């Protein structure tokens, strides 16, 4: 009997020791190995379950982050309005970047743009007065046929604020002032066509109107190596025939959204007030190298940026490319 009791006690002790040993192994696995295998979302994703959870979350949140593209249209008032790219999350790139982040890091979403079905090029020859109103960008258009003395200080102001503008050159001015034109080009600004002798384009014959555009186009190419894409009619005078003739030469006719009316020599404060009241997303802001615009330029830059708009060239503003501002 005593032997049986001893045997039972021994078996129980062995079971206790075995369970203790197994519990220790389990604890070791839970505390050391398992976190490295099953950390989910943003940890070291060695296990398929964690990766699947992360990928699922990215896919779900991608739906709310998608922005649909906007087609270019011909508006009754504003005529041709460019389209605007949409965006969607690049799921694979976002996932590959997120899975390498340390535990607890936020997902950094990477995007790819979605082109509209209808682009500016699809609309045919129409004048353009503004960019897409959903694009938070504006541009300075500086028409140059005179006012050389004001160009250097305007360039300095643009440089100081890291702004690139679009200069539309009168061809006869360009022929007489190639060095000034080259300095403007050196500063990184866009250079375009303002006809050759500042005529009223609507009053010219087809042959003369065509010549006004082509001579400046050739001068831009020969003097500056520029492939001209945009045409700004002098004094804003044009008709549909002007637009068609420019289109024949591969140029889109562009006018303005907001006019500084600087040729009337207003005080700088009046120009800044005018811009503040009228500028918005897609605005093209017309000025010339005048004392008024020279003095108002810094204030104009501050006003435009204060409205949450990025300043770019006419080319950039009228493109369908997205502009993503901080926290937008």
Image: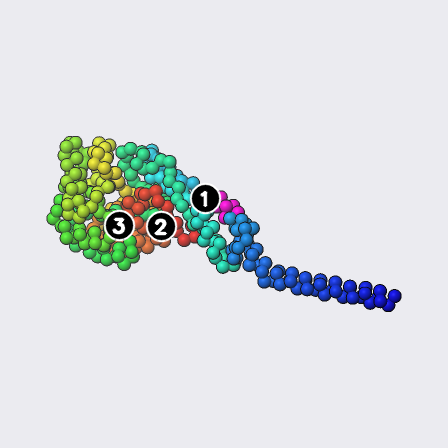
Residue drawn 52% across and 55% down? 45
Residue drawn 32% across and 55% down? 302
Marks 2/3: CA distance? Answer: 14 Å
Give the position of the N terminus as an image quadrant. bottom right
Asked whether 89 or 201 is in front, the reply is: 89
Asked whether 198 or 23 is in front, the reply is: 23
Residue for badge 1: 66
Marks 3/1: CA distance? Answer: 31 Å
Query: Dot 1: within a 10 Å radius of its alpha carbon, few (fewer than 14), some, or many (20 or more) residues?
Result: some
Q: Where is 3 relative to 118, above or below?
A: below
Q: Residue furthest left?
A: 176
Instruction: Give SS at disc 2.
Output: loop
Answer whether labels 3 and 1 touch (C-beta < 8 Å): no
Residue 165 is labelled as 3
Residue drawn 34% across and 37% down? 119
Residue 309 is labelled as 2
Our reading of the magenta stretch's main secondary structure is helix
């Amino acid at each position: 009997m005593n032997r049986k009791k001893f045997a039972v006690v021994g078996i129980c002790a062995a079971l206790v020791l075995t369970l203790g040993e197994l519990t220790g192994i389990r604890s070791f696995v839970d505390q050391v190995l398992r976190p490295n295998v099953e950390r989910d979302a943003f940890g070291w994703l060695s296990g398929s379950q964690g990766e699947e959870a992360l990928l699922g979350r990215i896919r779900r949140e991608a739906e709310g982050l998608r922005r649909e593209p906007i087609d270019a249209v011909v508006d009754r008032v504003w005529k041709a309005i460019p389209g605007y790219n949409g965006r969607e999350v690049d799921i694979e790139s976002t996932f590959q970047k997120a899975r390498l982040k340390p535990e607890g890091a936020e997902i950094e979403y990477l995007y790819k743009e979605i082109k509209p079905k209808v682009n500016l090029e699809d609309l045919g020859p129409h004048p353009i007065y503004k960019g897409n109103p959903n694009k938070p960008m504006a541009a300075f258009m500086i028409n140059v046929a005179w006012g050389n003395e004001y160009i250097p200080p305007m360039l300095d102001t643009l440089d100081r604020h890291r702004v690139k503008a679009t200069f539309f050159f009168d061809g006869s001015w360009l022929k007489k002032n190639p060095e000034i034109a080259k300095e403007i080009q050196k500063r990184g600004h866009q250079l375009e066509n303002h006809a050759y002798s500042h005529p009223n384009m609507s009053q010219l014959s087809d042959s003369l109107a065509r010549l006004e555009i082509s001579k400046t186009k050739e001068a831009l190419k020969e003097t500056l190596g520029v492939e001209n894409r945009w045409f700004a009619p002098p004094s804003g005078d044009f008709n549909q025939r002007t637009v068609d003739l420019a289109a024949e030469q591969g140029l889109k006719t562009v006018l303005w959204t907001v006019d500084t009316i600087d040729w009337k020599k207003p005080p700088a404060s009046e120009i800044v007030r005018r811009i503040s009241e009228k500028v918005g997303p897609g605005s093209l802001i017309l000025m010339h190298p005048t004392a008024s615009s020279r003095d108002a330029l810094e204030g104009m830059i501050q006003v435009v940026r204060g409205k949450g708009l990025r300043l770019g060239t006419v080319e950039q503003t009228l493109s369908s490319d997205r502009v993503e501002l901080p926290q937008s």
